[in-house]
Image (spheres, rainbow, N blue to C red):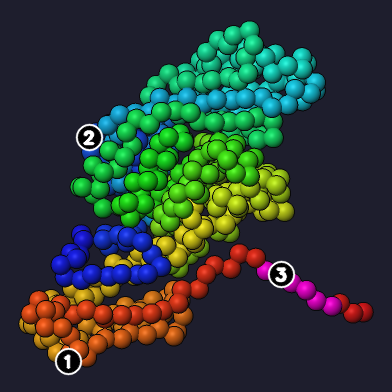
């Protein structure tokens, strides 16, 4: 439930528009569902069983995303599952990059939860010959037969294009080496912004994921999230996110737009549902108390990225899940703008809590006088919120709250009953991401 600007108006200079919803623990999944609109489920084994009772199968995309959320420790308590009005037809381009004889192309192809291993060793050093060989293997595989087969190519093919046979079911690839294979999801947007807007009218949620990997839909969802004060975790396996230092690609799109509330979660284990895992863990704890970097996740295969690929991801503020000297963890934990996701969550919570505190002060008093005594009540409400943030370690101790004297208030504000210029200042520590150690050892 929102707190009206008629009662309390809050401006946080560092932030942009902040959310009015006070519940920050609800994640949302936008997918094909066996009902109209949305339903809220407990994120637990019982909640997953309820999804099946409602008509989901354990192979449905929405169920699998919720299951990935539930497998995290900790994980958020509730998930809103919202039915998409129109479903995306998955279109995925795969381009072989290396034609050297003896090069081994190997990846897993999944469609409708059917997985097949595709493996080919180059014997004819042309892209067309590699495409022909892969096409034969894909079309004969169980995943290909399930609906992920590629269309017959022409005599001089430069890439393979998968087109999913069923809208709402993405073609998933895992284990592809971005140095060997260029992957791009080129699906068209089926109208994700409309689904998001409709869901926000009737339901409370804060962070969300969608059932698509498409650059078009990720861009549309990110623009909506920025304008509507939600956190969007976009899953992408487009190789341009880590292979290219800049230029085209969905990560570059997000970075150029400088989104504070959207992040590209790049992972080449598409069935691992990295974005769903991250949003579930991030919303499990109080906003501002947990960074999104250096977190181990369940059910996601970590990418073995080269140092240059990691640098490219860092340069565009991509969230990756990769090996670090044998240890798997999330990297960077920033929104596309470069702002820490933890900081953005804290800013959003601070805005909501101040609104609530001001309203609570109005509700708990028969009236608030336009006088120094009334002004002190409101200052105390804001100070109480900041004190709670201090206790949680979200802000540093040196915060201030200032309020003008009643004698300085304009006649217009006095008549309107409006207290202007109740101000606060505080410092939120940034996230430590690197430590440089030097020393001297004697023996």
**Residue identifier under label 3:** 436
User: Nearest the camera: 301 or 288?
Assistant: 288
Residue in the image at 46% along x and 36% along y: 215
> Residue 413: x percent and y percent?
14, 79
Mark closest to the chain's N terminus, 3 or 2: 2
* Residues shaded magenta: 435-440
Nearest to the eye among marks 2 and 1: give it: 1
Residue in the image at 32% along x and 51% along y: 227
Residue in the image at 41% along x and 28% along y: 188
Mark closest to the chain's N terminus, 2 or 1: 2
**Residue identifier under label 1:** 407
| Predominant SS along the magenta part | loop
User: Nearest the camera: 156 or 429?
Assistant: 156
> Residue 254: x percent and y percent?
47, 46
> Residue 239: x percent and y percent?
60, 36
Nearest to the eye among marks 3 and 2: give it: 3
Outermost residue to the right: 443
Circle 2 Cα neighbour tier, 10 Å, few/some/many (<14 / 14–19 / ≥20): few
Disc 2, disc 1: CB below 8 Å?
Answer: no
Q: Is residue 149 above or below residue 58?
A: above
Circle 3 Cα neighbour tier, 10 Å, few/some/many (<14 / 14–19 / ≥20): few
Mark closest to the chain's N terminus, 1 or 3: 1
Q: CA distance from mark 2 to mark 1?
A: 57 Å
Instruction: Work out whether residue 364 can be spotted.
Output: no
User: Secondary structure under badge 3?
Assistant: loop
Answer with left or right where residue 227 lies relative to residue 435.
Answer: left
**Residue identifier under label 2:** 36
Q: CA distance from mark 1 to mark 3?
A: 54 Å
């Amino acid at each position: 439930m929102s707190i009206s600007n008629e009662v309390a108006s809050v401006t946080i200079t560092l932030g942009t528009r902040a959310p009015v919803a006070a519940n920050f623990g609800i994640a949302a999944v936008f997918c094909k569902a066996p009902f109209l609109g949305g339903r809220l489920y407990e994120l637990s084994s019982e909640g997953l069983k309820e999804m099946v009772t409602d008509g989901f199968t354990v192979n449905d995309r929405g169920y699998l995303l919720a299951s990935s959320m539930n497998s995290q420790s900790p994980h958020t308590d509730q998930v809103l599952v919202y039915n998409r009005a129109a479903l995306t037809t998955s279109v995925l381009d795969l381009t072989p990059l290396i034609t050297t004889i003896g090069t081994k192309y190997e990846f897993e192809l999944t469609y409708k939860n059917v997985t097949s291993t595709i493996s080919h060793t180059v014997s004819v050093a042309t892209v067309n010959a590699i495409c022909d060989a892969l096409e034969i293997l894909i079309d004969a595989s169980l995943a290909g037969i399930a609906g992920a087969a590629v269309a017959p190519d022409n005599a001089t093919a430069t890439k393979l294009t998968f087109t999913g046979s069923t809208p709402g079911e993405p073609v998933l690839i895992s284990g592809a080496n971005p140095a060997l294979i260029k992957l791009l999801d080129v699906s068209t947007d089926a109208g994700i912004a409309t689904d998001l807007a409709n869901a926000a009218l009737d339901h409370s949620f804060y962070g969300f994921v969608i059932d698509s990997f498409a650059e078009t839909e990720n861009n549309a969802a990110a623009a909506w999230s920025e304008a509507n004060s939600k956190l969007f975790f976009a899953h992408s396996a487009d190789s341009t996110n880590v292979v290219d230092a800049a230029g085209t690609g969905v990560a570059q799109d997000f970075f150029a737009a400088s989104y504070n509330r959207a992040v590209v979660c790049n992972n080449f284990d598409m069935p691992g549902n990295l974005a769903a895992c991250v949003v579930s863990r991030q919303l499990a704890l109080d906003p501002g108390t947990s960074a999104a970097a250096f977190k181990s996740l369940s059910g996601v295969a970590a990418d073995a990225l080269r140092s240059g690929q990691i640098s490219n991801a860092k340069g565009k503020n991509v969230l990756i899940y990769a090996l670090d000297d044998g240890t798997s963890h999330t990297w960077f934990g920033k929104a596309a703008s470069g702002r820490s996701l933890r900081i953005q969550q804290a800013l959003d919570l601070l805005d909501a809590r101040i609104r609530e505190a001001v309203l609570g002060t109005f509700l708990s008093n028969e009236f608030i006088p336009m006088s120094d005594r009334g002004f002190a009540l409101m200052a105390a409400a804001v100070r109480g919120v900041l004190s709670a943030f201090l206790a949680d370690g979200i802000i540093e101790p040196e915060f201030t709250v200032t309020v003008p004297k009643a004698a300085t208030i304009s006649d217009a504000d006095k008549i309107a009953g409006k207290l202007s210029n109740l101000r606060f200042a505080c410092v939120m520590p940034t996230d430590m991401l690197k430590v440089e150690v030097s020393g001297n050892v004697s023996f």
